[in-house]
Image: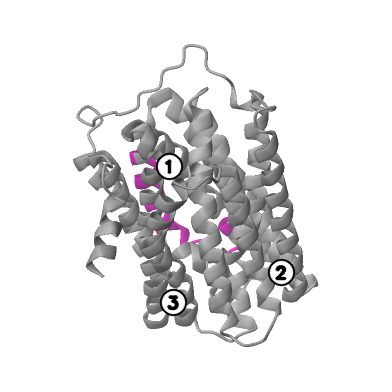
Amino acid sequence: MKLLFNKYLNTFKGLSTEVWWLALITLINRAGTMVIPFLSLYLKEDLHFTISDVGWIMSAFGLGSVAGSWLGGKLTDKIGYYKVMVGSLFISGILFIALQIAHTFTTVCLGVFIVMLAGDAFRPAIFVALNAYSKPENKIRSLTLIRLAINLGFSAGPAIGGLIITGLSYGGLFWVDGITCILASLLMVQVLNPKKAKVLDAIVNENPISAYKDKAFLVFLVAMTLFGIVFLQYFSTVPIYYKDVHKLSELQIGIILGLNGFLIFIFEMPLIKWLENTRFTKLGLMFFGALLTGISLLVLNLTSWSGILIIGMLLMTFGEMIAFPFSNAFAADRAKKGNQGEYMALYSISFSIGHIFGHNAGLQMTNVLGFSMTWDIIAGIALVCALILFSLNRNLIKLKP
């Protein structure tokens, strides 16, 4: 047991102090991001919107995410990642608190859009920051550490969120989320001074390549958009499926969603360390991750036994653990060829587009076709994603930017 624990600790060695601070800031921020997995339930149960209305509100969520990611990338290239991250955290914290006063369909759509506009400007900026604060050989593990922080926070967040809803109300979630965002921004100002931070991989391109001319990267973005559509079902349609079909309470839903983050915290870093030393390419590993994520939804149709929800969550978790770190690393590697903010903004936007179409399409399909047919269709999308990644892996050299 001691040997296993020491091996686990060794997977974290060599990462810079700045990366650890970024991970702590992300942990504080994400521990409070308990509104997101409960947003579709909040809109349906507390504000009494129809499933169709919830779908369109989640599209506004996605549009805000697209706009925020694009804006974050532009600002990162112009004013630097530090100012973008601090500003995004502080402003989104205030906006999360204010969002609870929106109650009509129009004001909720507008409020969600503005919150995501501010909040997701953070995403391309932190990717660029990680590129700067990580040695080339540590990039994937640095990205994985940030994901660990996200998922450790996310494992606690839904469980705590379920307790807050049970003991207080949905409104308490907005206060906690907003306050933690503000605290994360204040901590960043205190501990991550850009003048004192040690940049380990400064990348300067006098003639940067436009990400829009990188054919391989554009094909990769299509695959990531499809993966986002599949993965994001776990933050809109799946919680409603848990409640409406399997009759789970908000606390039980929070515990199952929290299991995802807990498993990632325990297994992802050793898994990534091991996979880095295998013969598989980044795109090849993403292929397997996409397949596992699709299968996680397909198995929900096999039985009415509620234990299948745990099996589905396990499959999705391991698919996510494989797909996300290596997709992050692939994007970061391509970003060295051009404007880093532009590359990482487009990478973030691919998932934001998934927010626009994934939540809405999933909710509309469940409303019209039912959950079983929806899971079959979404699994089909995962298969298409996997095939694109497989093809790109075989033809990567031909698609030069």
Image point (68%, 84%), residue name: 303
Amino acid on which the number 2 mark rests in the picture: Trp
Earlier residue among tags 2 and 3: 3
What residue does disc 3 label? 255
Amino acid on which the number 3 mark rests in the picture: Ile
Categorize mark 2 by other alpha carbons within 10 Å: few (<14), some (14-19), many (20+). many
Residue 122 image label: 1
Earlier residue among tags 2 and 1: 1
Marks 2 and 3, how far apart at CA: 22 Å
Residue 375 image label: 2
Q: Quadrant of residue 392?
A: top right
Image point (36%, 73%), residue name: 160
Marks 1 and 3, how far apart at CA: 27 Å
Question: Where in the figure is residue 268, as x and y percent of width and height?
Answer: 42, 58
> Relative to the observer, which residue lies in front, 27 or 3?
3
Tell me where the magenta segment starts and ends, as one range. Answer: 86-108
Q: In screen coordinates, is 138 left or right of 345?
A: left
Residues at marks 1 and 3 touching, judged by CB atoms closer than 8 Å: no
Categorize mark 1 by other alpha carbons within 10 Å: few (<14), some (14-19), many (20+). many
Residue 21 visible in this rendered orientation of the protein: yes
Q: How many marks?
A: 3
Marks 2 and 1, how far apart at CA: 31 Å
Would you place residue 265 above or below residue 333 in this image? Answer: below
Residues at marks 2 and 3 touching, judged by CB atoms closer than 8 Å: no
Q: Secondary structure at mark 2?
A: helix
